[in-house]
Amino acid sequence: MSATRPLHLAAEIGGPPRYDARSHIALARLAEGGALDFVTLNDSFARPGPDALAVLAHVAPATTRIGLVPTVTTTHTEPFHVSSAVATLDWVSKGRAGWQADVSTTEAEARLFGRRPAAPASTLWQEAGEAADAGARLWDSWEDGAEIRDVATGRFIDRDKLHYVDFEGSTFSVRGPAIVPRPPQGRPVTVIDATSGPAREAAARHADVAYVRATSPEQAAALRDELRRSAAAHGRDPDSLRVLAALTVDLGDAETTPEPGLGSGPQLAGRGTYFRGGPVDLAEVITQWHRGGAVDGFHLTPITPERDLERIVNGTVALLQHRSLFRTFHPGGTLREHLGLGRPANRYTLTSTSGATS
Amino acid sequence: MKQMHLAAHFPGVNSTTVWADPRSRSQIDFTSFEHLARTAERGKFDFFFLAEGLRLREHNGRIHDLDVVGRPESLTVLNALAAVTERLGLAATVNATFNEPYELARRLATLDHLSEGRAAWNVVTSSDAFTGENFRRGGYLDRADRYTRAAEFVSTARELWDSWTPDGTSRPFAHSGQHFEISGEFTVPRSPQGHPVVIQAGDSDEGREFAASTADVIFTRHGTLEAGRTFYADVKARLKKYGRQPGDLKIMPGVTVVLGGTDEEAQQNAAGIRRQQVSPQNAILALEQVWGRDLSSYDPDGPLPSVDPDPGSSLVQGRVRVADPLAVAARWRELSEAKGLSIRQTVIESTARQSFIGAPETVAAELEKFVAEDAADGFILVPHLTPGGLDDFVDRVVPLLQERGSFRSEYTGSTLRSHLGLTEPVWKG
């Protein structure tokens, strides 16, 4: 398959915990200057660091184009609150929000809440999928144009365009409708790291963007095909799913010692795929994988964000742009536009339209 | 002269926001929040205040459609506002019934870090199974339990905020109580204010006691001088038993202001706003809230219903209930007969009125009087227009207060605690 698909690039801006706003804003602006699709900020309840969604909400007014994707966990949180917060991130960023759904598997995290014991990943990923599903329904629960401000009848909204979602999950239920009107993107972008088996199933069903980890383009292509087939089996258009290779990158080495050696470096957290070398070497890897059509793009986690993100943007990305493999600016305004994903039709509008014509 | 505190409430979901006014703009676009917050900061206000919504209101089993509805999640908006303001305090209303201490303490500490010490939490509670239908915990907490949970929630959050030493060392925490049994390590270091400012809203005896024991600010609804003085004396007197000083709890009623070039013009403006707020449809709705019956067939320009209210009605959901509908109906009938008022006119006469009406000089003097006579320590202004409803006040009243020396001309500190004259909480590691 030839590389006719646009290349998508995203970068993590976390790293060691920082609680001030300036460093996060600086990194997001750097990524924005490189026309990256989005930045991510990893999060969990179990390790030092500020609330990621809050940080990216703070970054929103200080940036204009870059997508903003915090990790939001689904195990000890309320799906209704999560959907409201992510929708609000979309409002404050004018359509640049996403969220990476994740689970909390440890007993230590469970003790922070004291509501339920730790559970197996498969159970938690099923629940995460339900949280994503409930969230999407809540985002749809206001049809576009529900706010009518009709002075003649005194009605601010058309109540027929607001919908109860009546979601019944295995561990929660939500009545709805949302408090937050349908956000600018219709639905903010849902990201799931599809590395583990149970997460892969949730990604195939619910994600707009899925990460895979592979040590060769062939392996990445196989994972992408699997996700697309699975998405299709769930009744989705496989082209509505973007599959990015997740790569941890260390660009601290000099350009003269190229070590593309994927898989040969140390494994991070037992599941990272690690790249060590120079920015030009990284551009080579990306070019090679993308030319082969293995993936739709890359999610890069720099091991030292201040140093490596600068090298990614001014070295790797600049070279990819020079080769016309990557855009030089954001042609659209929303994250969905960067990703080439359409604004989802509202399921309730479809229902009421088909009801009206039948 | 006793200094007053000022805060701005973003007029979100309520029946007093005049959305039909041509000057009214979006209640959800970030530009609206930014406009009001920047206006408040230009006026050197202490803080900006956001309410929250957890379930859309219903009327007669259907979603209520007459008022402004649809609002963002408050902490997320405030984190964004922290990037476009520098000194203004940022207060989020967050329910203590449908949240958990660990997560909320972390979100509040994050806001305090990102805003460099400007975060506040307005603690509210719910006993409402209607709202609970959107949450895992679902069910019902009775009135007493919701306050014991809220009190334990606040003290648990403070344990978490104190689990980092001021010099930046994290220590494990363990809390075991009636409502929460949690332990581990808090992931956010002590924030610039130590503890974000705690605001409490509520007028019941339990609410007052809760505020006296633990809050930094109490948000009230007492609009008249006498009611304000009585409330002020009562709440301040409760502080002593908790070892607190009168200055440790600021009393800030939510008030509305209507200005005009003259007092007479202001009165005319106020009457016009009342007519806008009580549309014919809203007049019938207000009547149904008291009567607990479907009165949609009544003419708003006609007389009040002769039928009596239904005290056991479940017509209204997600709104404050009328405590004694029979007594309210009797009062409204008396007023209507005495003055020959229609339904709409009766509702306009009977329901919430503007607190301060007059030329800027008149309003400035009245505000100062409330503060000087211990009816309030300051005010939370609730404009009726989004987002420009505060512009006139900041341009025309604030300069007078500053000239007269009752309100700051510049921020002297950078944290919300410093604006409010509150001391740094003592670390209790």
Image: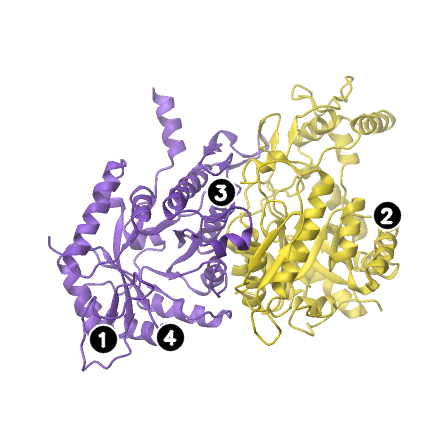
Chain colours: A purple, B yellow
Q: Chain of mark 2?
A: B
Which labelled disc corresponds to residue B227? 2
Query: Which residue is denoted by mark 1 in the rendering?
Result: A277
Tell me if mark 4 has few (under 14), some (14-19) or many (20+) residues whose alpha carbon lies within 10 angstroms of its own: some
Q: Earlier in the sequence, mark 4 or mark 1?
A: 1
Query: Which residue is denoted by mark 3 in the rendering?
Result: A181
Quarter placement of the C terminus of chain B: bottom right
Secondary structure, mark 4, is helix
- Do the residues marked 4 and 1 share a common chain? yes
Q: Is residue B104 left or right of residue A235?
A: right
Tell me if mark 3 has few (under 14), some (14-19) or many (20+) residues whose alpha carbon lies within 10 angstroms of its own: many
Residue A136: x, y in percent? 41, 41
Query: Which residue is denoted by mark 4 in the rendering?
Result: A306
Q: Is residue B343 left or right of residue A148?
A: right
Residue A274: x, y in percent? 26, 67
Amino acid type, label 3 = Pro
Residue B137: x, y in percent? 57, 40
- Do the residues marked 3 and 4 share a common chain? yes
Secondary structure, mark 2, is helix
